[in-house]
Amino acid sequence: MPRTAADIDALNARREELSTQLKSVDSRRSKLISQLKQTGDATATQGLEARLALLDARQLQLETDIQLTGQQLTSPAAGVIASTSAAPVFAGLGSKEIMTLSVLSIVLIWFPLAFAAARALWKRSNRPGPPHAVFTETAQRLERLEASVDAIAIEIERVSEGQRFVTKLLSESQPAPVLGAGQRTPETIRGS
């Protein structure tokens, strides 16, 4: 009796193999029957009839095995196991449905988008570039901009130099009295 889903899969595989073997035996039996009808030799007829008897026994055995496998698959335990299905993976869809939708989305959506993007890149690469005059005009504008920045830098340097000069003049116009540590003042000289 099958106890797991793997057991049921094994029984299905066995039944398919037995069916394949039964078809092979049937085709060999048909060939032997046609040979038996065509031969007129008594010894050949006996040999063919013996082989035909073996194939008949093998065919009966295969049919019995197929019937036994079918009974095991239709048993109540197999029905309970086979009726339980895997939980839906996403939005009520199983893994096979999700795989199918994934492949379809790749083929029907992403492939055409990738093809369109590649085609746009191809067309863009085949377009002629801007004319030489555009590059010349851009170079001239950059040179003017560079000259303007240099002029601004020189003027800022002049302003800062003027500010330093004014600061120096202001600091010199009001000298503060500074007394040194060892100097004598007139009062200290009289007192001595």
Image: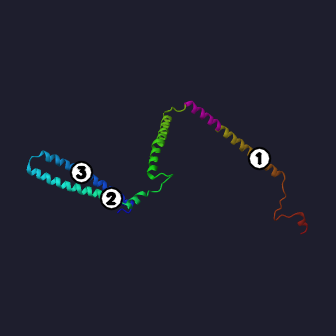
Secondary structure of the residue carrying tag 2 is helix
The amino acid type found where label 3 is placed reads: Ser
Secondary structure of the residue carrying tag 1 is helix
| Identity of the residue drawn at 76% across and 47% down | 163
* Residue 37: x %, y % from top left: 14, 46
Secondary structure of the residue carrying tag 3 is helix
Cα separation, mark 3 vs mark 1, equals 110 Å
The front one of 169 and 15 is 15
Horizontal side of residue 105 vs 185, given as left or right:
left
Horizontal side of residue 84 vs 39, given as left or right:
right
Q: Is residue 181 magenta?
A: no
Horizontal side of residue 10 vs 105, given as left or right:
left
| Identity of the residue drawn at 49% across and 39% down | 117
The amino acid type found where label 1 is placed reads: Gln
If you read the primary sequence from the N terminus, does the residue marked by circle 3 or circle 1 appear first? 3
Cα separation, mark 3 vs mark 2, equals 23 Å
* Residue 148: x %, y % from top left: 67, 38
What are the residue bounds of the magenta stretch?
Answer: 131-145
**Mark 3 residue crowding within 10 angstroms, few (<14) / some (14–19) / many (20+):** few
Q: Which residue is mark 3?
A: 24
Cα separation, mark 2 vs mark 1, equals 108 Å
Q: Residue furthest bottom?
A: 192
The front one of 28 and 176 is 28
The front one of 81 and 134 is 81
Q: Which residue is mark 2?
A: 71
Q: Which residue is mark 1?
A: 163
**Mark 1 residue crowding within 10 angstroms, few (<14) / some (14–19) / many (20+):** few
Q: Provide the major secondary structure of the magenta segment.
A: helix
If you read the primary sequence from the N terminus, does the residue marked by circle 3 or circle 2 appear first? 3
